[in-house]
Image (tube, rainbow, N blue to C red):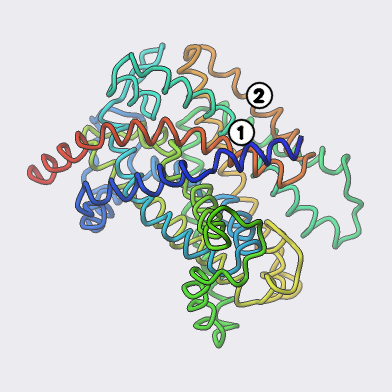
Amino acid sequence: MEQLIKTFSDYAWGIPLVVLLIGGGLYLLILSRFLPFRYIGHAIQVLRGKYDDPNDPGQISHFKALTTALSSTIGMGNIAGVAVAISIGGPGAMFWMWVSAIVGMSTKFFTSTLAIMYRGKDSAGELQGGPMYFITEGLGKSWKSLAIMFSLFGMIGALPVVNANQLTQAINDIVLIPNGVEVGLKSNLIIAFVLVSMTSVIIIGGLKRISNAASKMVPSMVLLYFVLVLFILISNYEVVPKYFVMIFTDAFSAEHFKGEKLLGGVLGALILLGIRRGAFSNEAGIGTAPMAHGAAKTDEPVREGLVAMLGPAIDTLMVCTLTALAILVTGVWETTSDNGVSLTASAFNHAMPGYGAYLLMICVLIFSVSSLFSYAYYGSKCLSFLIGADKKHYYNYIYIISIILAVTTPFSMMLNLIDGVFALMAIPTMISTLILAPRVVKEAKSYFKRL
């Protein structure tokens, strides 16, 4: 089974998908004449609520839409995903994650603007946004098969299997094993039971409760994580410049690459690894974030696009870079065979012996739990599109069963499963976005003229 899922994931992440994600993102950047980057200041003003109008259509504020989207993207991709990238690809993998984020900012701008431009009504008559709606509303009913494809894979892609798996690994490695507790199926199932109970309380409350929880948790967790990594960097300040430079030099030499070579040799494999981990972390072009941004209270699509584009900057350029530097400056990436969250824990323990791993544990707990809430919303939205809003609560049962499954299966299997499904979600999202892109550019020109 594990080998089958790995083959599926590697096949899905072939050269065509990278061309679609990165090539498509670059095309959007050039088409918009770097518009997202020219208006970063304006995006921050919108986020701070300067233009909020309580009478606008939608369910939640710009800030809550961004924090709901971020609570799913700032999760294990930033702690475990970066660790996987560095343990396989060395420091150079981080450079290609940056490239995916910069290109991803323009993709996020386009997909989330479309999520507001072409909102559709679900069967209960509620306004909804997301790739399945902008495909059917923007491209017409003849493209509905793409929307169905997105929703089907979206239901699997939204399963919290990587988060649940890595949270369990973190609890085992950081809390249970060092304190002499025997770890096995029984202890894992107890963790799963606690996770299921916590998640159920929030997700049954729906989007309002999810966005309230996310808007309180996300800013504080990013701040705590930022302070901890800053401490690690200051205590290893003499090697920080060396590793920072190494991210650039290693990106083109790939001398620390330990993975399997691809058609393009080592460098091609390294680029693919960085882009794949970047996409897993910031989800630009995958289509999950437009579902959260599509619920924002606004009648100006471009505003939501600008807010959404801050996502990859916060997620990958900031949080992932912090994780990467913490792993690099402490040297653990060369001295231990750990992978995923355990590698990041080694870095924290190395810098702050005795208590570092426990502080990381707090971050991991908040990162994972906040992701568990948001993903449930995405999955139920996909199911609602397929079989009707009155039946979307059935997704919560599938979701809860998947947590129990994830806790008892190997990490690589869960990561490959979500990777492969993300690739299949990106196909309908990117194809429809590229076709509809000129309409977004037109809308943006009109918006900035009126501004």
User: Residue, x 66% and y 59% (percent of image)?
Assistant: 259
Q: Which residue lies under the disc numbered 1?
A: 159
Near mark 2 (Cα within 10 A), the count class, few <14, some 14-19 or many ≥20, is: some
The reply, left or right, for residue 35 in relation to residue 284 is left
Counting from the top left corner in percent of width and height, residue 348 is at: 67, 69
Q: Which residue lies under the disc numbered 2?
A: 398
Q: Quadrant of residue 396?
A: top right
Residue 436 in view of the camera: yes
Mark number, residue 22: none
Q: Quadrant of the N terminus?
A: top right
User: Residue, x 39% and y 29% (percent of image)?
Assistant: 131
Q: Quadrant of residue 87?
A: bottom right
Check disc 2 and report its element: helix, strand or loop: helix
177, above or below 199, in the image:
below
How far apart in space, not on screen, are marks 2 and 1 (Cα)?
Answer: 8 Å
89, above or below 43, in the image:
below
Amino acid carrying label 2: it is: Ile
Q: How many marks?
A: 2
Outermost residue toward the left in this view: 449
Counting from the top left corner in percent of width and height, residue 342 is at: 72, 60
Counting from the top left corner in percent of width and height, residue 204 is at: 57, 26
2 and 1 marks in contact (CB < 8 Å): yes
Amino acid carrying label 1: it is: Leu
